[in-house]
Structures are given as structure tokens and as C-alpha cells.
Image (spheres, grey):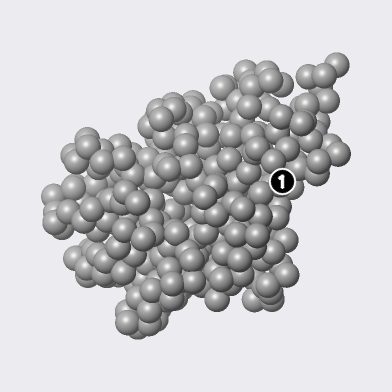
């Protein structure tokens, strides 16, 4: 497995950072609104299937059971019922991953194994004191180890937002480095910033840079449990950090919006923004994901509607 290697902490990219929120919002509108309106039914069907292939289908409920996870895995592998799907799509299109709690990883591993999809659908586990991150470091690292032992191939860690709010960037870096070390080359590391609890857009940008220096393969907006989750303006700020990190290091780091992406229209806006900023090479499961539990319902609805339109 190819993973992002840690680089030494560098405070220079964190200096003199300024974010003009109104300018960011205008840029988002320019990047997405006009282009979305220009999409034909055929293009929208393409985007719909693309969104599906980039989704981490998620269940993170207190009442999750083995049966819930098995149903999740089956839907990840076969998102459209055979009687309604285009024959060329049935069994061929699937989500990028399933995302569950560490204690449910074993269930996901067995379910995907029975479906013979372990080589096609990744198993992501939220870890490190999700969703707050307010747990002792040794227990957060133990969660990572446990999840990987159970079969996780991706670890979605959550940062301690108190370090972000207090500007303790070196300490944040050191903690994420230890989490990177715990993942080793057995699992990709996706770092959840919890943007709704980071205070400012400047903090979001700085936390993004620190997470990438510390070896994150993806930076992720939210846990989905905060009052504010994935929004396009905050996504653009994180994209600017990814672009700057790529300029400085030549490393491509992924982005994962999570929480609030519920419709194909939401997903298309994100994908167009990625295409217009980072480029189409980022629109792959290796560099872009949606964290979602409800998006697949609208994907299914739009898939049937658009397919029907195109058959007329």
C-alpha cells in the first residue's frame, strides 16, 4: 500500500494566512452554479454514477448491529436492484468503501468477504475517540491498531479540536504522526478536522496543512456529528491547502467531504469544484471521497429517473 510519508513540521506555511470568506463564497458560486445548470441528462447520469463510485457508505449509529453492517455491505456492492438496473451496471458499479465503528469492522470484513468484494470495496473505520477526539492518546492509538487487526484498510481519525483552537500546531502534528505510525503501510490515514468546531477558516487551512505534513492521505471535513459539516466554502479552503501542499512537496493529498452531502445535486457541485480547481485526476477513489449515509438513496432515485429519460 502506498501511503503519504511524514515530513518535518514546518511553521512557515502557517504564517500570514488570511481567508476572505466573502471572496471564497463568490469563488464557489462562480465555480459551480453556472456549470451545474449546463449539465445534460447524459452528463448528470455520468456524475451520478461517479458520485456512487466515490462514496464511503457509512453507518455510525449507537444501535449498529452485525445485521445492519451486512445490509450496508450488500448495498455497497449492489446499490441498484437487479430488476431495475441497466445490465451493464448491475454488479459492476459499487461504492468506494464502507465506513463503520472499529467494533463493527470484523462484521464488514466477513460480509464483504462473503460477497467476494474485499479487493474492490475498502473498509474504513472511524477511530481515535470519534467524534470528539477528547480521549487519552494511548487509547486513541489502540483503537487504530484494533481496527486494522479486524480488517480495516482505511482509518478515519479525528483530531483534538482543542489543539486547533489554541494554536498548538506542533502538538497536533506530533499526535497525527503517531497515528500515521500506528497505521503504517497497512491502512490509509484520513484525518477529520471537525471544521464546525475549528473556530475560523484560517484554523481550517492551518489544520489542513499540519495534517498533511504529518502523513495524512486524506483530509476530511467533518465527523457528521457537528452542527456545521461539509460546506462548499470550507471545502474550497481545504482545496487551497491541498494545492499549496502539492506545490511545496509534489504530493497529492485526497479530500473527503462528510456530513451534509445528501443529494446528487450536492455531490455534483463538489465534483465540479474539484475538477475546476485540483483537476480531473483528483476525481478518483484514491483522492476524493464522500462520507455519506443518505446520499445513496438520491443516487438510486436519480439513476432511474435519468436512465428513463435517456431511453425515450
Q: Nearer the viewer, residue 121 or 271?
A: 121
Residue lying at 38% horizontally and 74% vertically, measured from the top left: 145
Q: How many marks?
A: 1
Q: Residue at x 69, y 20 (%)?
A: 42
Position of residue 183 measured from the top left corner of the image (x, y, whole percent):
34, 64
The answer to which of 304 and 120 lies nearer the viewer is: 120
Residue 122 falls left or right of residue 69: left
Question: On screen, 88 above or below 231?
Answer: above
Name the residue carrying label 1.
79
Is residue 46 among what the camera can see? yes
Residue 51 x %, y %: 60, 38
For residue 225, side relative to residue 85 (left or right): left
Give left or right: position of 79 versus 139.
Answer: right
State the SS at label 1. loop
Q: In this rendering, is residue 17 above or below 168?
A: above
Observer-nearest of 31 and 288: 288
For residue 218, side relative to residue 62 (left or right): left
Q: Residues within 10 Å of mark 1 (few under 14, many from 20)?
A: many
Kindly indicate the quadrant of the structure image that contains residue 11. Answer: bottom left
Q: Position of residue 34 (x, y in %)?
A: 57, 22
Residue at (85%, 16%) from the top-left corner?
312
Residue 297, percent across and down? 74, 47
Give the quarter of the image for residue 240. top left
Identify the residue at image location x=86%, y=39%. 83
Please say whether residue 199 is visible from this viewpoint: no
Amino acid at each position: 500500500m502506498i501511503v503519504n510519508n511524514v515530513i518535518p513540521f514546518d511553521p512557515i506555511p502557517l504564517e500570514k494566512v488570511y481567508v476572505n470568506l466573502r471572496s471564497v463564497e463568490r469563488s464557489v458560486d462562480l465555480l459551480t452554479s453556472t456549470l451545474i445548470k449546463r449539465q445534460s441528462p447524459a452528463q448528470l447520469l455520468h456524475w451520478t454514477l461517479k458520485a456512487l463510485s466515490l462514496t464511503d457508505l457509512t453507518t455510525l449509529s449507537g444501535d449498529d448491529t452485525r445485521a445492519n453492517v451486512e445490509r450496508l455491505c450488500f448495498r455497497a456492492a449492489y446499490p441498484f436492484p437487479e430488476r431495475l438496473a441497466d445490465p451493464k451496471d448491475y454488479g459492476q458499479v459499487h461504492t468506494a468503501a464502507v465506513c463503520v465503528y472499529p467494533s463493527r469492522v470484523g462484521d464488514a470484513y466477513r460480509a464483504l468477504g462473503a460477497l467476494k468484494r474485499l479487493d474492490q470495496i475498502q473498509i474504513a473505520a472511524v477511530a481515535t475517540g470519534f467524534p470528539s477526539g477528547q480521549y487519552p492518546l494511548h487509547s486513541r492509538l489502540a483503537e487504530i491498531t484494533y481496527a486494522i487487526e479486524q480488517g480495516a484498510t482505511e482509518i478515519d481519525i479525528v483530531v483534538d479540536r482543542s489543539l486547533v483552537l489554541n494554536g498548538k500546531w506542533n502538538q497536533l502534528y506530533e499526535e497525527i504522526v503517531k497515528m500515521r505510525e500506528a497505521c503504517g503501510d497497512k491502512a490509509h490515514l484520513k484525518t477529520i478536522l471537525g471544521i464546525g468546531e475549528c473556530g475560523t477558516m484560517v484554523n481550517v487551512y492551518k489544520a489542513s496543512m499540519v495534517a498533511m505534513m504529518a502523513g495524512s492521505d486524506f483530509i476530511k471535513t467533518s465527523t457528521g456529528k457537528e452542527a456545521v459539516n461539509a460546506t462548499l466554502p470550507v471545502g474550497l479552503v481545504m482545496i487551497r491547502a491541498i494545492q499549496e501542499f502539492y506545490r511545496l512537496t509534489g504530493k497529492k493529498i485526497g479530500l473527503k467531504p462528510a456530513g451534509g452531502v445528501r443529494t446528487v445535486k450536492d455531490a455534483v457541485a463538489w465534483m465540479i469544484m474539484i475538477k475546476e480547481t485540483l483537476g480531473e485526476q483528483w476525481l478518483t477513489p484514491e483522492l476524493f471521497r464522500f462520507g455519506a449515509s443518505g446520499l445513496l438513496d438520491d443516487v438510486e432515485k436519480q439513476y432511474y429517473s435519468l436512465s428513463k429519460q435517456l431511453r425515450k
